[in-house]
Amino acid sequence: MNIKEYLKVYFIMGSNNCKGDPRVVLKEAIAGGITMFQFREKGEGALQGKEKYQLAYDLQQICKQHEVPFIVNDDVDLAIKLGADGIHIGQEDEKAYIVKEKAPHQLIGVSVHSIEELQQAIKDKADYVGMGPVFPTTTKTDTKAVQGTNLIQQARQQKIDFPIVGIGGITAENAEKVIQGGADGISIITAISLAMSPKQAAEQLLQAVK
Ligand code: TZP
Ligand code: MG
C-alpha cells in the first residue's frame, strides 16, 4: 500500500484522549478499518518515562498484529527505540531533514500551515504533511487559525501532488469536504477516541472518504 492509502483514515490518540483503556479503543478502531495510527502522548496528564514507553509498546504490538502502520508523534528517540513505522513532527520540533537522517527508513510526517512550510517539508524529504485545523477543534488548544480546506486547495491548484492529510474537527459528517478539497485522507482524534463505539465511528469515517 502506498502512503496516500495509509492516510485515508489516520487515527491519532494518546491516553488523555480516551475515557477507557487506549488499547481497547485502538483495537476497536482497527476493527472499524483505520488505515494508520499515531501515538500522540501529550498535554494534561500525559504519561512519562516507563509508563509512556509501555503504552507505546502495547499499542505498537496491536498495530503489528493487524498490519496497521504505527507512527510516533514528536518523540524521535522513542520512535527509533521502538522501531516505529514513522515519526510525526511539528514546526516547533526537530527539523524534518535531521529526523530523516536519524531515521532514514521511517515515514516522516510534518504539520504545515503554509505553502512555504509545505515546500520546505518536501525539500526535507518528508513523506506526507498534515494540514489544519480544517474545522474548529477543542482537542488541541494551541492551534493556528481554522483554515477550512483553503491551504489544501491552494496546494492542489499549484499542482503539488504530495501526500496531504487534513486534521482538526473532522467527523463522518464533514469528512467528505476535506477529500473534495484535495486531501488524500483525514486524521482524527476525538471523533473516534471518544465515540460510544470507536469501531462504528471508524467505519463511518472510512465510508465517508471512499
Ligand atoms: N493538530 C491540529 S488540530 C489537532 C491537532 C493535533 C487536533 C485534532 O483533534 P480532533 O479531536 O480530531 O479535532
Ligand atoms: Mg510536535
Image (spheres, helix red, strand yellow):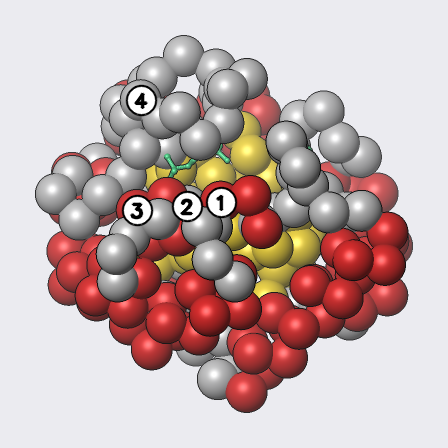
On the image, the x and y values in percent for residue 207 come to 15, 63
Q: Disc 1 beta carbon < 8 A from ligand 1?
A: yes
Near mark 2 (Cα within 10 A), the count class, few <14, some 14-19 or many ≥20, is many
Which residue is tagged 2?
189
On the image, the x and y values in percent for residue 160 come to 40, 39
Which residue is tagged 1?
17
- Number of marks in the rendered image: 4
Q: Nearer the viewer, mark 1 or mark 3?
A: 1
Q: Secondary structure under badge 1? A: helix
Q: Quadrant of residue 44?
A: top right
| Residues at marks 1 and 2 touching, judged by CB atoms closer than 8 Å | yes
Q: Disc 2 beta carbon < 8 A from ligand 1?
A: yes
Q: Disc 3 beta carbon < 8 A from ligand 1?
A: yes
User: Which amino acid, by three-letter code, is at mark 1?
Assistant: Asn
Q: Secondary structure under badge 3? A: helix
**What whole-number distance in Å separates the C-alpha atoms at marks 4 and 1?**
17 Å
Near mark 1 (Cα within 10 A), the count class, few <14, some 14-19 or many ≥20, is many
